[in-house]
Amino acid sequence: MEPSGTTLEQARAHPGAERPCRRYTVAPCGVELAVSEWGDEGDPPLLLAHGGFDFAGTFDVFAPMLARGGWRVVSWDQRGHGDSARAHLYSWEADLRDAAGVVESVGGGPMPFVGHSKGGRLITHLANSLPHRVSAVVNLDGLPSHRAMSDMPDHERTRRLRTEISAWLEHRRSLVGKERRPGTIDELAQRRRRMNPRMSDEWLRYLVTVGAERSADGWRWKVDPALRMGGFGPWQPQWSLLQLPGIAVPFLGVLGLEREEMGWGTRPDEVLAYLPPGARFEELDGVGHFVHIEQPRMVADLVLEFLS
């Protein structure tokens, strides 16, 4: 029986949202990853990486705009997110290996890498790891501040790593057999609002229909309960800044200036000194962390013009 409130058909009718043209799985590192594609198979590929606690479906408005600009847009649900398989443990290195595996599965020569938030950091590292496969980098509000960056002796780094891993293992043990709390489409949309406070109710309800699954007792987000905020393994997000100067292809950085819980709180002056030579940097006043969702047309036009 359909739960009370917004129905699946009503929530799915979001203007401009288009589900992927093609969906398939790859398993480059032993974990099955759900891959989504928008656009003509014969168009040049463009890699698109989502942020933490997101999934490829969050690009259902943005990706088709890039596809209509002449690109075959390839995205994937990161391990533990969306329709990709869950893993026993998660780490930044595993996400990076998965991303490299998706690139390998696409084949061909260099392609643009585009990423939002955690995905922006991911493709920044990927560009330095696979310089022969990248033609341009677009980082959408994945530029963390250096304020929390600190230097420390090697033995302190080792101790900190041990502490992080021990805490992660304890957290993982506490969640064995646990599931995310079920709810109606409207209830899950309101939970998501904590992450997306500037988004419309219509968009949040649409996200439930593509990022959650329905069972007998309601809808549940398709995100592994073992994942936690910032839980990408023992990693400092500020270290991504040190990856920027080494990028040797055209670089576009986009920063939303409105503060949000999921954002980095980065100020433009904290990034400018780290940008690679010749980089382009755009500050979006009045736009929050989810720049590609809040202003998809504006950001898509920026990306398409940059890549042209």
Image (cartoon, grey):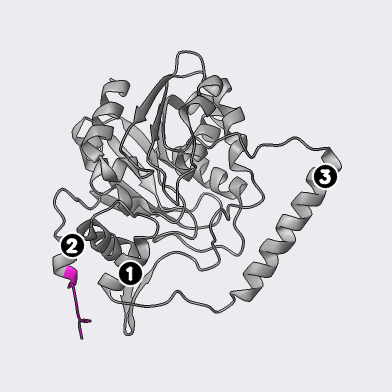
| Residue corresponding to mark 2 | 12
| On-image quarter of the N terminus | bottom left
Query: Magenta region, mostly helix, strand or loop?
Result: loop
Q: Residues within 10 Å of mark 3 (few under 14, many from 20)?
A: few
Cα gap from disc 2 to disc 1, whole angstroms: 14 Å
- In the displayed structure image, the side of residue 16 where residue 209 appears, left or right: right
Residue 109 visible in the displayed image? no
Which residue does the image show at 61% across and 46% down from the upper left? 93
Amino acid at dot 3: Glu
Position of 292 with respect to 25 (left or right) is left
- Residue 284 lies within the magenta run: no
**Front position among marks 2 and 1:** 1
Q: Is residue 158 visible?
A: yes
Instruction: Give the residue type that dot 1 points to.
Output: Leu
Tell me where residue 201 sits by quadrant: bottom left
Residue 152, x across and y down, in percent: 79, 38
Residue 239 appears in which quarter of the rendering?
Answer: top right
Task: Bin the neighbour count of mark 1 within 10 Å (Cα to Cα): few under 14, some 14-19, many 20 and up.
Answer: many
Which amino acid type corresponds to the residue marked 2 in the rendered image? Arg
Q: Which residues are magenta?
A: 1-8
Residue 45 drawn above or below residue 94:
above
Nearest to N terminus: mark 3 or mark 1 = 3
Secondary structure of the residue carrying tag 2 is helix
User: Relative to residue 44, is residue 160 drawn left or right?
Assistant: right
* Rendered image: mark on residue 156: 3
Q: Earlier in the sequence, mark 2 or mark 3?
A: 2
> At x 51% / y 64%, what residue is drawn?
86
For marks 2 and 1, the one nearer the N-term is 2
